[in-house]
Image: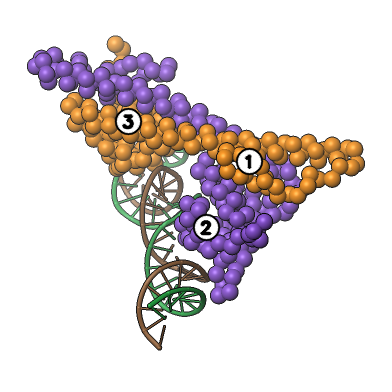
Chain colours: A purple, B orange, C brown, D green
DNA sequence: GGTTGATCTAGAGCCGGGTCTAGAACCTAA
DNA sequence: TTAGGTTCTAGACCCGGCTCTAGATCAACC
């Protein structure tokens, strides 16, 4: 119970959230804060630990692709207080679905990428062998077709 | 062996790649094509099935976050022909790493999102119960702290 | 009192990745 | 032959999400 309320400067908040001071002011303009940012003497912004916690959540949601308007809407709901949990739930579920499909897409892409990495690993290995053993021409045509994932994938 | 070489209009290619005709012309300007796009009488673009295959790969790589300059570089390497497989490998491995860490980040974010969804599900359920049974006050303060992922997560 | 360094505001600029427009040319089909 | 749809080029525009600038103010230290 030593610290009543931590008060932090914009620079300190930038440090501990990983956001730039510019981004912090920008987020404020965009209405991403739940509580209006307090001002100290001289008109400087004063942040609390709660602000940092909230921003930490924001950073995670942003990193997972939540657009600023959604984040701003979420902040609105939280600011309003209890009673709108259904809407918060809907918002979060929407984002959850979004992230889940995004992970799915990336994982699919990774199949292709791994396939290509495998192909080039083989080619490089063969190339090395040819260099050292002084024969073995490059493997047929440069462009051949190989089945992958149901459709045909060109091996470039 | 019926079709010698498929020739497709820009509209047809747009249809089967999911890219817009605008995007196709834009990609061409950006140097994303391996072979210069042929022109038919009247100066119209003529694409082959190979172009479509290549574009399909491009679409997947783009969807997984490969930036246009990297894609353009990759196209350069393929255009150059055999002999630069090490560099293609490096490029693909770089992108693989990128996608892998991206999936990791999203998965982590999903933990937070799922947590929040759970919290709101509970709150909504309690709210419903309160509505139907006509008592049970809202669960303590709106802002309480709950441990999640090592750091403290605010439940808004 | 002077010199840093952090902060302030308002607004401009930038980057990635397209998207759209205008005005002309071309290609069927009726 | 005329109308509709497609395509052409060059270049402007847009959107999201910051980032940076200018010019002023403030706080702290020597």
Residue at the extreme top of the image, as rendered: B1
- Residue B81 coordinates in the image, percent (x, y): 19, 27
Task: Name which quarter of the figure residue B33 lies in.
Answer: top left
Please give left or right for residue B39 compared with residue A42 in the image: left
| Residue A98, position as x, y percentages in the image | 56, 36
* Label 1 element class: strand
**Who is closer to the viewer here, D5 or B29?**
B29
Q: CA distance from mark 3 to mark 1?
A: 36 Å
Q: Chain of mark 3?
A: B
Above or below A87: residue B57: above
Q: Which residue is mark 1?
A: B147
- Residue situated in front as seen by the camera: A99 or A36: A36
Quickly name the residue at label 2: A13
Task: Tell whether label 3 touches label 2 (CB within 8 Å).
Answer: no
Q: Which mark is residue B93?
A: 3
Is residue A128 visible in the rendered image? The answer is yes
Residue drawn at 45 percent across, 36 percent down = B102
Q: Are marks 3 and 1 on the same chain?
A: yes
Q: Disc 1, disc 2: CB below 8 Å?
A: no
Nearer to us: label 2 or label 3 = 2
Question: Would you say B100 lies left or right of B145 here?
Answer: left
Q: Is residue A58 above or below residue A28?
A: above
Please, which chain is the residue tagged with disc 2 on? Answer: A
| Residue at the spot 33% in from the left edge and 28% down from the top edge | B54
Percent of width and height locating residue B109? 55, 38
Chain where mark 1 sits: B
Tell me the SS state at disc 3: helix
- Quadrant the N terminus of chain A occupies: bottom right
As measured in the structure, the alpha-carbon distance from the residue carrying label 2 to the one carrying label 3 is: 36 Å
Q: Left of A37 or right of it: where is A136?
A: left
Residue A23 seen in the figure? no
């Amino acid at each position: 119970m030593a610290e009543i309320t931590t008060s932090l400067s914009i620079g300190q908040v930038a440090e501990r959230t990983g956001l730039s001071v510019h981004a912090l002011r920008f987020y404020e303009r965009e209405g991403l804060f739940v509580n209006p940012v307090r001002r100290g003497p001289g008109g400087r912004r004063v942040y609390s630990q709660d602000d940092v916690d909230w921003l930490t959540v924001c950073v995670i949601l942003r990193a997972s692709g939540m657009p600023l308007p959604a984040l701003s809407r979420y902040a609105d709901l939280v600011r309003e207080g209890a009673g709108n949990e259904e809407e918060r739930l809907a918002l979060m579920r929407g984002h959850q679905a979004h992230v889940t499909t995004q992970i799915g897409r990336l994982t699919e892409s990774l199949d292709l990428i791994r396939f290509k990495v495998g192909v080039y690993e083989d080619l490089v290995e063969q190339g090395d062998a040819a260099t050292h053993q002084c024969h073995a021409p490059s493997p047929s045509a440069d462009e051949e077709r190989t089945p992958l994932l149901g459709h045909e994938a060109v091996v470039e």
